[in-house]
Image (cartoon, rainbow, N blue to C red):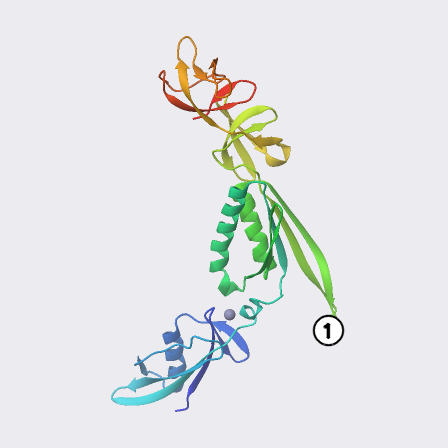
Amino acid sequence: MKAINLTLCSCDKYFDKGMWKPYHGIEKLIADKVKKQIPKAKVIFKNFEMPMAQKEKKEIEVIAKVKDKETHVKVILKLAKCPLCAREGTQYFEAILQVRSLNVSVLEKAIDLLKKRVEKLRNKGMFINKVEPVSDGFDLFMTNKRIAQSLGKELHEHFGGVFKLSPRIFTRNKQTSKDLYRMSILVRLPDFQVGDIIINHDKVYKVDKTSTKIKLLDIEANNFVTTDYAKMHSHPLKAHTTYVSRIHPYVEVINPYDFQSSMVKNKSLPTLEIGQEVKVVVHRGIYVVE
Ligand SMILES: [Zn+2]
């Protein structure tokens, strides 16, 4: 029986009759190939070794057993790159994902989420071939525009903000006369995240949920409002630690700026005790936020 030659890519595809096809388990792939020549054979693997480096070849031997007859079959495994994986580490890109935020912590979380996703998308030919830092974020050069778009949407759904798609013709392929579209995907993330205290249109809120809609807790009234990020006019507010100075007839705390006992603006509060530590923000009055 002649040797079986298999050209494999690290994304679990192999080259067969001019095409790259996915396979599920290398042993099953080899066994299927052996059975094409020796039907009903039981395929036994002895010492199995995969090639690790590009273009490396590993020669192994398997035994095809039919009843008591054993045939030794030589299998040559070669590692290569399929066209999708060959894009990794090149200049190739189909989309630029522009991630922006004025909040470093939001940016870091967004990049962490992207890294996690992209690691699992390798076998779909999705790579980030270049990362270009800009003053308020990153430009990520990605090899698959459809996936880049859905990643941008995911960021928008998770963190809120603005999502903008601008497809543009980049170049015309001279051989095929086809236009090559490259896509810019802008995701401008808010400068706040869940749990932050912000001023929005001159009122104090705690950010409760960020998504395509933003859910805010009105600290003074103690109720929730939902708004569009585009309608917001906000900036973050720093919280201070202070103490409860009075509870009757109204709750008062020590103002962290002038150290005077001041009435708080919250309309409803959990039960507090004098001397208890609380977090407050100051904006035309003082608000207990935690
Ligand atoms: Zn591949």
Q: Percent position (x, y) of residue 14?
A: 48, 75
Residue name at image x 56 percent, y 66 percent: 89
Left or right of residue 233: residue 268: left
Give the x, y percent position of residue 223: 49, 24
Query: In this orientation, which residue lies closer to the viewer: 211 or 113?
Result: 113
Q: Which residue is mark 1?
A: 175
Residue 201 position by quadrant: top right
Farthest residue, direction front: 258
Classify mark 1: helix, strand or loop.
loop
Figure check: 114 above or below 230: below
Depicted 82 relative to depicted 103: above or below: below
The answer to whether residue 40 is above or below residue 248 is below
Q: Quadrant of residue 180?
A: bottom right
The reply, left or right, for residue 181 in relation to residue 40 is: right
Where residue 289 appears, x then y in whole percent? 46, 25
Residue at 49% from the left image edge and 55% from the top image edge: 115
Q: Residue at x 47, y 33 (%)?
A: 195
